[in-house]
Amino acid sequence: MASLLTLQDVRVTLGSTAIGPLSLRVDPGERIAILGPSGAGKSTLLRLIARELRPAAGVLHFDGRPLAAWAPSDLARRRAVLPQQHGVAFGLPVELVVALGRVARQGDGDQDRIVREALAHAQAEHLHGRRFDTLSGGEQARVQLARVFAQAWDARDGLLLVDEPVAALDPGLSVSLMAAMSDFAAARGHALVAVLHDLNLALNHFDRLWLLKAGRMLADCDALPATLPLLEQLYDTRLRLLADDHGLAILPLLGHTTGARA
């Protein structure tokens, strides 16, 4: 199977953050979590893949074509991005924020239906009619997730890029929305790449892990219990793995570090 996205010897610098060289691939339908300590370059890598940043070296290909060669409207039909910050400059109605995900589709007669279904899929249907700037941080995150769903609703074999998508949510909602994202992507053949800090979500909802430390790829590995030593190395701390029929859980052992951080 041909890869959906490839990075070949890519380097990028943003302020004091430099990452690379990286050679990576994303296959159709894959779910990949980007993990690493704060400042490792996770969001920078996601912005590079989203074409918000230009590589200083190397090349990225999306669906067999250089990423830089895609017209913005064509790329918007195949790739949706949920950034870490959710600010909107004006007091827009929630449904209009979600509808912004459909701007690349002119004459979209299904927009109203898709907006409502996207809000329901993001567990935010009750926010329809509200002003975005009156919502809590968690509510805004759910509306922005609905925007991503609306953008990718009728596409196939696309790419969803999300940066800390459930960081402002309570544990129960975090789990259910992560499952909703996985189900949404799987139903349409979309690949899902997410920046996360929650190791439990990463191990229970993703296929592969990109472990990024100080701008370098420590490992590109399957999301399996055997990755525990790599995760300990990534975060310079001892971890305990628990497993039962419901899934996996990782707990840090307080006061147990493995060495100085890189």
Image (cartoon, rainbow, N blue to C red):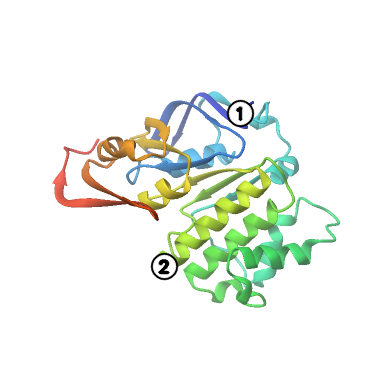
CA separation in Å, label 1 and label 2 = 35 Å
Identify which residue is drawn at 60% across, 40% down.
Answer: 29
196 in relation to 260, above or below: below
| Image quarter of the N terminus | top right
Q: Amino acid at mark 1?
A: Ser
Q: Are marks 1 and 2 in contact (CB under 8 Å)?
A: no
> Residue 6, percent across and down?
57, 28
Disc 2 element: loop
The tally of labels here is 2
> Residue 116, percent across and down?
70, 68
Give the quadrant of residue 143: bottom right
Identify which residue is drawn at 56% across, 72% down.
Answer: 133
Residue under numbered circle 2? 170
What is the number of the mark on residue 62?
none
> Residue 167, percent across and down?
43, 59
| Image quarter of the C terminus | top left
Q: Is residue 115 left or right of residue 134?
A: right
Disc 1 element: loop
Q: Residues within 10 Å of mark 2 (few under 14, many from 20)?
A: few
The one of 23 and 251 positioned closer to us in this rendering: 251
The one of 48 and 16 positioned closer to us in this rendering: 48
The residue positioned farthest toward the front in the image shown: 245
Q: Amino acid at mark 2?
A: Asp
> Residue 191, percent across and down?
59, 41
Q: Tag 2 or tag 1, which sits nearer the N-term? A: 1
Q: Is residue 45 left or right of residue 192?
A: left
Q: Residues within 10 Å of mark 1 (few under 14, many from 20)?
A: some
Residue under numbered circle 1? 3
21 in relation to 239, above or below: above
